[in-house]
């Protein structure tokens, strides 16, 4: 082993350690920022170590790709709005899967003779070409998973960005998808055993089509689970292709991403009371005639809400995607500070799938400077709603809808929710009378103890702050 190879292997070990420590630190909001930096340094070291490997070709193309990717990522990362972060995560995740699929494609085409055609002939069997069976199997598996993750993530991005209907369904869709999946398996076997270019191309086309078809019928309420699942797919694909290339950094990083993604997917599916297979192959919840919602929407003015909260003992704030759209997190934090100054006990209640991706609300609140000890998870806060004087819902919809517990025919039936309806008083800040991401009416809005404060989230939060100041005699 040469000094260069030894140094590269040592660098990969350091990078893997930084990946692991960074991932561990991401488990807590307090250390997540430093965890991302640690993992970033690990990736930088791993990338640099790759240039130490022997027989490295196309250095010009590699450097060009690195420069272009770095510049584009830096610019887009600086410009992207916090409301568009889920879309960016979906796209970047798809790029990871696409990269793994591209590695698999290059290796398979190399074996078929298109790249390293000196000894391989189109149609030659893998064993005759001297390709290890395990390597070939993992190349095909990684390519299939990466291609599905790429096209599926693009569809997820289109759904989140409002460019595509949230659910696209047609009769016999699941049977058709199953046939496409079987075709991908058959073509994968043919591509791996014959090393024929035509079978390889057909295999990739069908794998990409499967990712699209799998994601089209999935509803918006399931999208956080889908993003997490495709993230896990990308990790596995990278690990498999890392084995094909003999690259330890790719294997370790891919397995960690895959394992973390699978665990997160399982936790979110549990939080929604949804088996993962029903997310991918079934409709969300039950079907049938939904129960009629009784009651009426009762508006309220900002001054009355401010007085109600000012003289409350306990207040719980429930943020959702609408808060992100309105960029109201800073004003909500200012409102919280005013209430705390008056001796009101304030907490934030976070549903596991609030927003459009895991941790979306935590990121928003952290950006506004909300202390972590004021933020409570669903399981911890639910028993406290019965003793809460006022719950303020801003932008949240489906995650507080009580029909998830009361109506078996509801599309979200069975999904655990924040028990806001148990509060003594509930105030909902909402721009209009539209439905949530799942497209259904919210029974909470019609409850006897609920009042609607109509308007932009940031403007209404600002109005509440002004009204509280007025109650204090204009103080600050």
Image (spheres, helix red, strand yellow):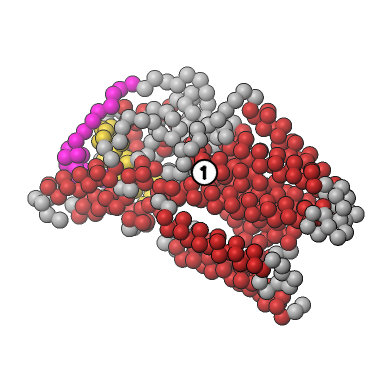
Q: Is residue 323 visible?
A: yes
Q: What residue does disc 1 label?
A: 157
Q: Which residue lies most toward the left here? A: 473
The residue lying at 67 percent from left, 57 percent from top is: 239
Q: Report crowding for label 1: few under 14, some 14 to 19, many 20 or more residues within 10 A (C-alpha).
A: many
Q: Position of residue 230 (x, y in %)?
A: 59, 46
In the displayed structure, does residue 462 sit left or right of residue 395? Answer: left
The residue lying at 70 percent from left, 49 percent from top is: 143
316 in relation to 297, above or below: below
In the displayed structure, does residue 448 sit left or right of residue 396? Answer: left
Quarter of the image where the N terminus is located = bottom right
The residue lying at 36 percent from left, 41 percent from top is: 322
Q: Position of residue 294 (x, y in %)?
A: 33, 21
Q: How many marks?
A: 1
Question: In front here: 342 or 354?
Answer: 354
Q: Position of residue 330 (x, y in %)?
A: 29, 52
Q: Which residue lies most toward the right here? A: 128
Q: Secondary structure at mark 1?
A: helix
Q: Is residue 265 visible?
A: no
Q: Which residue lies most toward the bottom here? A: 3
Q: Position of residue 378 (x, y in %)?
A: 42, 44
120 in relation to 55, above or below: above
Question: In front here: 42 or 418?
Answer: 42
338 in relation to 294, above or below: below
Residue 314, magenta (yes or no): yes
Q: Quadrant of residue 173?
A: top right
Quarter of the image where the C terminus is located = bottom left
The residue lying at 12 percent from left, 54 percent from top is: 475
Magenta stretch: give its range: 294-315
Residue 301, magenta (yes or no): yes
In the displayed structure, does residue 140 sit left or right of residue 284? Answer: right
């Amino acid at each position: 082993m040469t000094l260069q190879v030894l140094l590269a292997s040592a660098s990969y070990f350091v990078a893997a350690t930084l990946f692991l420590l960074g991932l561990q630190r991401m488990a807590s909001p307090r250390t997540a920022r430093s965890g991302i930096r640690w993992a970033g340094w690990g990736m930088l070291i791993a990338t640099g170590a790759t240039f130490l490997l022997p027989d490295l070709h196309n250095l010009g193309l590699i450097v060009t790709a690195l420069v272009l990717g770095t510049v584009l990522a830096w610019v887009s990362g600086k410009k992207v709005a916090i409301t568009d972060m889920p879309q960016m995560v979906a796209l970047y995740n798809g790029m990871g899967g696409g990269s793994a699929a591209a590695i698999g494609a290059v290796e398979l085409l190399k074996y078929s003779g298109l790249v390293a055609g000196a000894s391989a002939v189109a149609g030659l069997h893998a064993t005759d070409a001297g390709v290890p069976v395990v390597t070939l199997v993992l190349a095909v598996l990684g390519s299939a998973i990466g291609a599905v993750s790429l096209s599926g993530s693009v569809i997820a991005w289109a759904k989140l960005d409002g460019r595509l209907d949230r659910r696209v369904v047609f009769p016999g869709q699941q049977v058709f998808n199953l046939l496409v999946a079987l075709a991908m398996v058959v073509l994968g076997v043919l591509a791996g055993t014959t090393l024929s270019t035509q079978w390889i191309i057909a295999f990739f086309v069908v794998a990409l089509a499967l990712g699209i078809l799998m994601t089209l019928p999935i509803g918006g309420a399931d999208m956080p689970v889908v993003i997490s699942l495709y993230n896990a797919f990308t990790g596995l694909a990278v690990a498999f292709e890392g084995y094909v290339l003999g690259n330890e950094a790719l294997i370790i990083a891919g397995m960690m991403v895959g394992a973390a993604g699978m665990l997160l997917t399982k936790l979110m599916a549990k939080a929604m009371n949804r088996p993962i297979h029903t997310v991918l192959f079934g409709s969300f919840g039950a079907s049938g005639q939904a129960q009629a919602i009784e009651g009426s929407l009762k508006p309220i003015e900002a001054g009355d809400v401010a007085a109600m909260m000012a003289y409350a003992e306990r207040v719980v704030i429930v943020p959702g995607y609408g808060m992100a759209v309105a960029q109201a997190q800073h004003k909500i934090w200012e409102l919280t500070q005013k209430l705390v100054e008056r001796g009101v006990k304030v907490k934030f209640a976070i549903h596991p799938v609030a927003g459009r991706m895991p941790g979306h609300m935590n990121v928003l609140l952290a950006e506004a400077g909300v202390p972590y000890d004021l933020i409570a998870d669903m399981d911890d806060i639910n028993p406290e709603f019965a003793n809460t004087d006022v719950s303020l819902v801003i932008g949240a919809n489906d995650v507080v809808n009580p029909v998830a517990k009361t109506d078996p025919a509801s599309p979200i039936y069975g999904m655990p929710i924040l028990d806001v309806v148990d509060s003594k008083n509930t105030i909902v800040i909402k721009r209009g009378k539209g439905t949530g991401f799942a497209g259904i009416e919210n029974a909470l809005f019609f409850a006897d103890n609920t009042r609607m404060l109509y308007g932009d989230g940031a403007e209404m939060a600002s109005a509440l702050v002004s009204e509280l100041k007025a109650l204090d005699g204009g103080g600050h």
